[in-house]
Amino acid sequence: HVWGKDAESYKRGLLLQEKSVPAPDQDVITMSVEAARRAVLRAGIDPKKIGCVYIGSESHPYAVKPSGTVVADALGATPEIRCADYEFACKAGTEAMFVAYSHVIAGNVIYGLGIAADTSQGAPGDALEFSAGAGAAAFLFGKENVIAELLDAYSYMTDTPDFWRREYQHYPQHGGRFTGEPAYFHHTLSCAKGLLEKSGKKPEDFQYVIFHQPNGKFPIAAAKKLGFKEEQWKTGLLTPLLGNTYSGASPMGLTAVLDEAKPGDLIMLVSFGSGAGSDGFIFQATEELPKVQNKALKTWPQLNERKRYISYGVYAKFRGKIRKA
């Protein structure tokens, strides 16, 4: 590694193999548009019936100007629409999803679009640089032709300063090992336990479980602590090949699971965002799911096919880490 780091030790310790790198012309907006178009394609709906668009991210291209208006316009959903960008570190995506869902349940809109997207940042030579990836997942919520019903939801959060970035900073700072037990594990496990208790369900009731995945190690450890088995977590564990997509991490895991799930399957998702908090959801696949699974690109084939590997120099150029005077 150009910074003198032992890349192999990071790969072994964090269960990472490779990661996604956005092209210079890709950002949260472009990735959100692509993901949202696929969601609309699968749903087969008129975009004009989308009543709200919410995007959760910690790498919105603009500090002042919403990403959502661009996405809504690209979909053909404007002008009669509600829109806002959400932030809560890596939990922003599930927050956006829950707000979109809530508008639908309240009867305010026919369809609500919740998007989780990030082009993750990591300072040169920092541990984050080995895992920081890019990706987006979009979910269309509605009351008709439901492919996965949201059965229950639960959130857990505290003021925990494990990871932060100020407005003027290009890269985030983090508390090293402090990001583990008091941050990630405390919140994800507390949220998962609360969700299980609220729903009256046990780990063995689920066919799939997805945890926020900043690396390959943490979500497996969390799943094991709760009594989940490998066959329950492996489908939604994307980070070893995708990298940490921050807000997109657990939602993208959900897309991979929905690609394969069968009617009646129970799915548990637990996100995590530094600062810190977790959202937990229980979904159940319906008879409508198989009808849409092959209508657009699936998640795992996008990770396994048509790969292009680049050098660190090209990566640094693409991510703006080499700045001209």
Image (tube, rainbow, N blue to C red):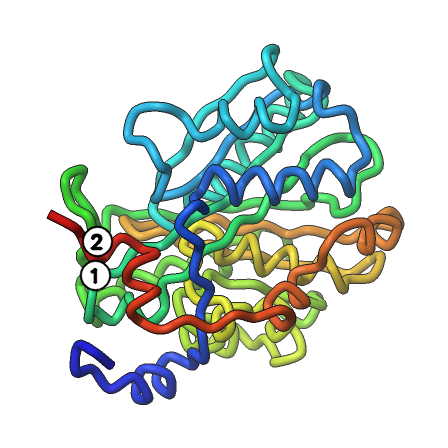
Q: Earlier in the sequence, mark 1 or mark 2?
A: 1
1 vs 2, front mark = 1
The residue drawn where x is 44% and y is 67% is 243
When the figure is inspected, residue 144 is found, relative to residue 236, above or below; the finding is above
| Image height of 139 relative to 212, above or below | above
- For the point 28% across and 66% down, the residue is 128
Which quadrant of the figure has residue 14?
bottom left
At label 1, counting other C-alpha atoms closer than 10 Å, the crowd grade (few under 14, some 14-19, many 20 or more) is: some
Provide residue 21's location: percent of width, then percent of height: 43, 61
Q: Amino acid at mark 1?
A: Ala
Q: Residue furthest front?
A: 325
Residue 16, x across and y down, in percent = 42, 78
Q: Are marks 1 and 2 in contact (CB under 8 Å)?
A: yes
Q: Which residue position holds label 2?
A: 172
Tell me the residue at 59%/12% (across/down).
79
- Is residue 7 visible to us here? yes
Looking at the image, residue 72 lies above or below residue 212: above
Residue wearing tag 1: 123
Q: Is residue 54 left or right of residue 311?
A: right
For the N terminus, the image quarter is: bottom left
Location of residue 204 by image quarter = bottom right
